[in-house]
Amino acid sequence: MANHRNRHTVETPHRIVIVGGGAAGLELATRLGNGVGKDCLADVVLVDRNSAHFWKPLLHEVAAGQIDASSHQIEYAAHAKWNHYRFERGGLQSIDRARREIIVDETNDTDGNTLLHRRSISYDTLVLALGSVTNFFSVPGAEDYALTLETVEQAESFRRRLLSSLLRAGHAQQASPQSGNAPVCVTVIGAGATGVELAASLRSLAEMLRDYHLPSLDPLTDIRIRLLEGANRVLPALPQQISSRAHDVLTSLGVEVLTETRVRSVRTDAVVVGDDRALSSDLTIWAAGVEGPPVLKTLGDLRLNRLGQVAVDRMLQVDPSSGIFAMGDCAACPAREDDTLVPPRAQAAWQQAVYLNDAITSRLKQRPIPLFAYRDQGTLISFGRAGAAGALMSELLRRPLIIDGWLAASCYKHLYRRHIMGLTGIRRTAMYWASQWLRERVRPTVKLN
């Protein structure tokens, strides 16, 4: 890794710019800020178009009304002050590699008024941590009519639409019990981790609505949840034992699971599958795959793979002399010596953030830097009230350790706790969980508005 500037003074320290404040970007900014930033060895800047961070693996719980997103967000400006870095709000527009600058779009408020004008930010080291967007695989109508779970706003939009549909169905049933009203049909496309967790959570939402708000609502007959998967089983990337467990849980919850079912098109009121059947659908949500964000295709000389991810080496560099790195879902990084790529998972983003913190710090202190090696620690799947299941992996184990029940549920919760602790420290994490405990006891367990 070559240094762009040979010398840096206290007045003009080495500037590290991180674009994207997701699981990878915010973790890296926190570690660098409390390391080289606090020691005045570098100026650390985090750039993100949003004002707050939310952990994406929890979006399905927001969509199902199980958590209030506002109580789980971390404000970038406050977090920057506490952790010795600087926050700049805005979206990445372009990179000037010759001048070592990025151009940040102007930022507008909800009324369309300009808050921050278009501006440039210089860098010595640039880290792209832009995450991913939904891959619709060119399926006709999917982008127009299917909802996605990329942001808090999208998850909240889905929750409000589903809540309105269920309220109308419940009141119609209450007004005319013998009329046999049609159920609200929700179709989830893609039975990976997000799709399975969302389908399970939606059934819990209907049950909680009945308990709190609509005693006439029957969770099994008034909402029809359908999960579509093109492979021959749900969770096709995970061991067969976990896939079978997930299938059993979903069917026990009344979720209609259709495997080996390819989606041909999506309409406003239906999903058309491979044999030209039109499956009625009041709400359709797409959870079938991800790709790199579109802005990467506009940056010119970055090498992208077929999924639009930035190709990097095993030091997460775009190329050795550029000073540009990429990590997380937006990066196509070799996992080890072979051509296998690091999967787009939260644990991979965390491992890359830890690695880049050490690598950039070593670079500034002119120490040798090892190659990145991804270590698969396993996968955990939450079924909401029905528990969790997963596989733990370690270099000490010859095969995945399958876990279920309370142990799997505890490990699943631990992942988020570790994320929060890494970002806020032990003291603030303790206060955070105490406030969540109190919040759960003074509010309903489902968001009703």
Image (tube, grey):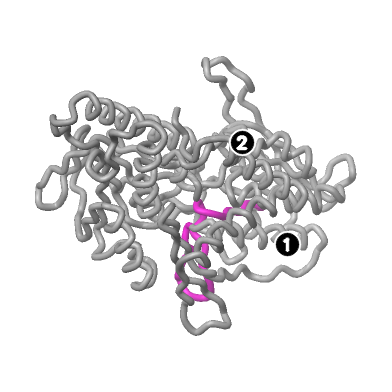
Q: Considering the image in quadrants, where does the N terminus appear?
A: bottom right
Q: Which residues are magenta?
A: 323-344
Magenta stretch, main secondary structure, is: loop
- Horizontally, residue 367 falls left or right of residue 125, namely right
Residue 145 seen by the camera: yes
Residue 336 drawn above or below residue 277: below
Residue 191 percent coordinates (x, y): 32, 56
Give the CA separation, mark 1 to mark 2: 25 Å
Q: Position of residue 70 (x, y in %)?
A: 57, 34
Name the residue that disc number 2 marks. Answer: 52
SS of the residue at dot 1?
A: helix
- Neighbours of disc 2 within 10 Å: few (<14), some (14-19), many (20+): some
- Tell me the residue at 78%/41% (across/down): 82
Badge 1 amino acid: Asp
Q: Is residue 317 visible?
A: no
Is residue 87 positioned above or below 204 on the image?
above
329 part of magenta stretch: yes
Residue found at x 61% / y 33%: 103
- In terms of image quadrants, where is residue 102? top right
